[in-house]
Image (cartoon, grey):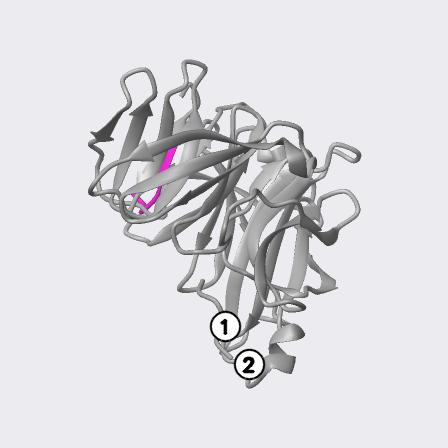
Amino acid sequence: MVPIFKNSIISQMGSVNGLICLWECKHDNTYICNPVTREVITIPTNPQYHKHGILITGYGFGVSSSTGEYKVVRTFQRERPFNRNEYKFATKAEVYTLGTRQWRSVGRVPYWLQSEVAAVLNDHCHWIVFYYEDAFARICSFDLNKETFQLFPSPPIQEIGNCYQSLAVLKGCLCVSDGDDSQFTIWVMKEYGIEKSWYKEVVITRETLNSTYLCEGLKDGTIFFMSGGLCLCAFYPRSDRVEEIHMFGSSKRGLAYRPSFLKLQNFESERVHIREFGSFESTVMPRPCPSYPHY
């Protein structure tokens, strides 16, 4: 078997039904893999957009419940639009459906994506975005069935979109972590899509806490998160305690992963390879277990 990802800088871009989406930035390679079966698909780059000066701003990976299709969606734009009007039309999106061997354009997106990796729930990918119309940060969603973007109800916090915020799915609910240098608050949307259902779940205080990326929540209330891109942490609500979990290497964010035996060979037309997984800079945690434009 030929090693893959060995000594490469790989970012995890989502997981669904035992499949993981990975992105290798240097050569703009996107992979879908199943660590259990050791199968890997290399998604071809879109030659139309694989040009110098193109910045990938967001990724999402999920499955459409209406069709059963597995889809990768990503947004991109030129690195340096020249003025406000160009910012408004700079972002574009494309979708790759596993088994088709091609990217499809889904048009322009009136947002600047701040959160790189989508939180996927209820057939929708969610990101924190900068909205061009009123210059405020919001949450947007992408419908994996209709393949359309729309704004999504945000929690009642003073400023959504700062560098200490992230989106995640914890215990089946969409969540936003919001904080500063000393603490962060986890907001939970109890009823999906209902703005008034946002509520403050917990406030975690820690003197050395940096920007956080939520990973997973357990039934006993334990919450896992990445802190400052340096370490994996666990918060235990019963004792109001944060514990650092030692791991090899470092990673910006973690990934909640549920193994499966889903075979990538089921996707016709895809070129599937069996690989030995080498080390790569990402954290995968088994289940239970981009800056703003300035004008």
Q: Which residue is mark 2?
A: 81
Query: x and y percent of residue 117 in the render?
Result: 50, 49
Quadrant housing residue 65: top right
- Between disc 2 and disc 1, the foreground one is 1
Residue 144, given in percent of the width and then of the height, sits at: 71, 44
> Along the horizontal axis of the image, is 154 left or right of 246?
right
Q: Nearer the viewer, residue 174 or 117?
A: 174
Residue 221, given in percent of the width and then of the height, sits at 41, 18
Seen at 40% across and 21% down, the residue is 289
The part of the image, by quadrant, that contains residue 66 is top right
Which residues make up the magenta segment?
Answer: 278-284
Give neighbour class at mark 2: few <14, some 14-19, many 20+ (Cα, 10 Å): some
Give the position of the N terminus as an image quadrant: top left
- The verdict on residue 19 being magenta is no
Q: Which residue is mark 1?
A: 293
Q: Residue furthest bottom?
A: 82
Q: Residue drawn 57% across and 42% down?
A: 155
Q: Which mark is residue 131?
A: none
- Which type of secondary structure does the marked residue at label 1 adopt? loop
- Do the residues under discs 2 and 1 have CB atoms within 8 angstroms? yes
Name above or below for residue 94 compared with residue 117. below
- The residue type indicated by label 2 comes to Pro
Image: 143 above or below 162: above
- Look at the image and tell me whether residue 3 can be seen: no
